[in-house]
Structures are given as C-alpha cells and as structure tokens.
Amino acid sequence: MTITGRLVALLAAATAVVAIGVRSWAGFWWINGVIAGVALIDASLAGSPRYLAITRTGATTVRLGEGAEVALTVINVGRRRVRGVLRDAWLPSAGVQVTRHPLDLPVRGRASMVTIVTPTRRGVRRPDRITVRSSGPLGLAARQTTHRVPWEVRTLPRFSSRKHLPSRLARLRELDGSTATHIRGQGTEFDSLRDFVQGDDARSIDWRATARARDVMVRTWRPERDRHVLIVLDTGRSSAGRIGTGTRLDDAMDAAMLLAVLASRAGDRVDLLAYDRQVRADVRGRSVLEVLGAVSDALAEVEPELAETDARGLVTQILRRAPHRSLVVLLTSIEPAIIESGLLPVLPRLTSRHTVVVASVADPRLAEMAQERGGVEAIYDAAAAASATAARERAGATLLRMGVTVIDAPPDLLAPRLADTYLALKSSGRL
C-alpha cells in the first residue's frame, strides 16, 4: 500500500484541530487511528494493478534526433475498476518527455497510450519498467505494482545529408545517359553514335562512321557500372573528437550513408568497414534496396574507441575485402601525428592498387578562432588555430603527392563534397 498527498493533508489537518481544540494525546491517537483505518479500507477497495494485461506496439527503429511512437495497450482483467496513474519509465537517453499517464479502466476495459521516444544517442534503447498506482475511492491510499514489458527501439545514425541526394541523383542520371548529356573518359563504356555538335571533343569523332554518313559522327560514352566502392570508417581515438553537437564519427557516418546510397544507385557494389584495432562493422554484398538499411543498422551501435587505430591492420582488412581495383574512401582525421606515424608508411600498399579518397571532418571553430582579435588571449587562440590549420594543410598536401584525393570539409559540407568527388571520379573514368 502507498499513501497519497490527500492522506497526508488530512492527517495534518486533524493533528492541527486536535492540537488547538482538544489538546489531548488520546484525542491525537484516536483521530489518527480512525484516519489510518479509513485509509486501509480505501486501499482494500482499490482495483488491483496486478490484474492488468499490458502490451507494447509501435516503432522498433528511429533515426537519431527524430521521434518514434511506442504505444501501450492496457486491459483490466481484474474484478474492480482501476483508477490511478501509469508511469512508463525509460532511460534518460531515450528522450521521453511524458512518462505519466492517467488511468481509469472499468472491468474488461481497454486503454491505449502513446510514448514519444526521441533518442539522444545511437544504439538500442529499452524501457525500464511500468509502474501502476491504483487509488481507492477516497483517494487516501493506493495499491502499487510494477510490470516488465520488454521492447527495443534501435536508434540509427542521423542521416541529415539525405537532402543532398536528389540533386546528386540528377547529376548521376546525366552521367549515366538518362538525359541528353553524355561524357567521354578513360575507362567508360561505349554507348551510341550521334551527330557532332559545337563543343564536342574532337577526340570523340568516329571517323569510320563519319565516312559512312553524311555528317560528322561522335561516340557517346556512359560511366562504367558494377565497380567496387569500399567505404572505411576510422573509429579510433580521433573519431571521438566533438565538433558542434556531435562527434567526428557521427558526421563521418552521415557522409558514408549518402555515398553508399549514391554509389549503389549508380550500379556500383558498395561495402562498408568500420575499424580501429578490430572490425566494428562489416557490410558486404547488399543490393541497392538493402544497402542503406544495412549500413544504418551496422553503424547503430558503433562508438569511438579511445585507442590509436592500427593502420597496418586497417590496410590489411581493406586489401582482404578489395583484392581488385576499387575506390577506397577512408573517413578519418587529417591530423599530422595520425597521418605521418600511422597512415603514410602503409598508404603505398593502397595507392598502388586502388583509387584512394581520404575524407576528414574539419572543425569550423578553428576558422572562427583564427579570425579573432581584441586581446592577448584571443591573439594566442588565433595563432594556435592558424598553426593547427597549417599543419592539417601540410598533411593533406603530403597525401595529394601520394596520389590520394583529399577532402577536408566542415560537418555540413563533408557529405555533399564526398558525393561530388565520387561523381567527378566516375565522370572522368577514374573509377
């Protein structure tokens, strides 16, 4: 049995009356005993919360930052009406704002209530327990019990770069020949012949076809399909750095999902690897309709590992998954210490066989600090920011000299620039 605020208020009022009017210990104990007895009777008349059948339905997956509905259905299978409060408790990271719901169920009555889950972290979010408090007719006391109703809401990575997908798909259709625009490049597939128009590359003229026709004929080409794209996420210590409201790894995941969808729509085979000192996520051989779901699900519970990434092990894992020429996109941090001591010694093993793109999340705060003036502390901050930016630029230049395409962009620009780089490589025949 539990007591309510109404019982406490009644006891306080009765005690005050006795203290002022009667001024007797016997009267004090008598009035409080009567009230306690009434409270016990009130609790015995309350409907039993044990005889409630509770089930959950609703969403099982949600994107980080978005809301999902999980419904509770409560049926009173007892012999008395149940009036009171139901508390549906979740962990704080589930982002549930309203956990208490009023309850008034007659015998065989049914009620439904919706909990809005808005997770603040990736991974699996589970409810704790359901507590039901059934009050008596007078509201002085209540009967309380807890129920365990298991449920899981899997929180997938945020995919805010989805808004860039339509424009990149339109460009992809142009490259693929779905519109009137055709391109020519090394490693592309022959598509058809058409009349020469002003602006066409003279190298695309088909002289044999021109000799047979009255007009100058040119060859049109379309990008090769069924290429292999391997997206690699570095989940080591550097990926834990916070930029804005998230981590570098969160922004890298967003860019990886946009590239995975775009490349799969282009007809390429897309695989994904997340690695630090061991494999954290591995997605292979998924179709165009499955790739986004598979990548999102695989990355849902991946968190940064607070240890340096094993660069040799990473390259070994890449070569094991990509034995033939592929596009390898490595999402890591372009920090001089990480690049020089970790990646540079083993990078030639990749560049000799694959087309390599290194993409990194740049902290926009560095650019802001570099522009600050006004005091000694601000000047020191600006100097430190300029030094850090110059070091990143030197590391990027070193990678460029080794034949690597480098992308260093702030969080909101990383995903679209990576997509544009992929389209540029495809249009130029380097993929």
Image (spheres, grey):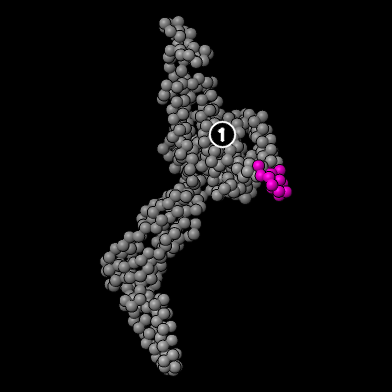
Residue 33 placement (x, y as % from top left): 39, 88
Asked whether, in this view, residue 190 is left or right of residue 45, the answer is right
Q: Circle 1 sits in a helix, a strand or a loop, which is it?
A: strand
Identify the residue at image location x=51%, y=34%. 419
* Residue 283: in magenta span: no
Residue 211's spot in the image, x, y percent?
A: 45, 5
Residue 237 image position (x, y, % from top left): 62, 47
Q: Name the residue under label 1.
A: 328
Q: Residue at x 47, y 32 (%)?
A: 168
Query: Which residue sits at x=61%, y=33%?
Result: 406
Q: Quadrant of residue 43?
A: bottom left
**Quarter of the figure that contains the N terminus:** bottom left
Residue sitting nearer the eye, 245 or 380? 380
Which one is in front, 148 or 119? Answer: 119
- In the picture, residue 409 is in which quadrant? top right
Residue 267 is at least partly visible in this image: no
How packed mark 1 is, by other alpha carbons closer than 10 Å (few <14, some 14-19, many 20 or more), is many
Instruction: Tell whether 218 sits left or right of 348.
Output: left
| Displayed quadrant of residue 371 | top right
Q: What stretch is highlighted in magenta?
A: 371-385
Tell me: residue 419, above or below residue 57: above
345 sits left or right of 268 in the view: right
Name the chief secondary structure element in magenta: helix
**Residue 41: % across, % down:** 34, 81
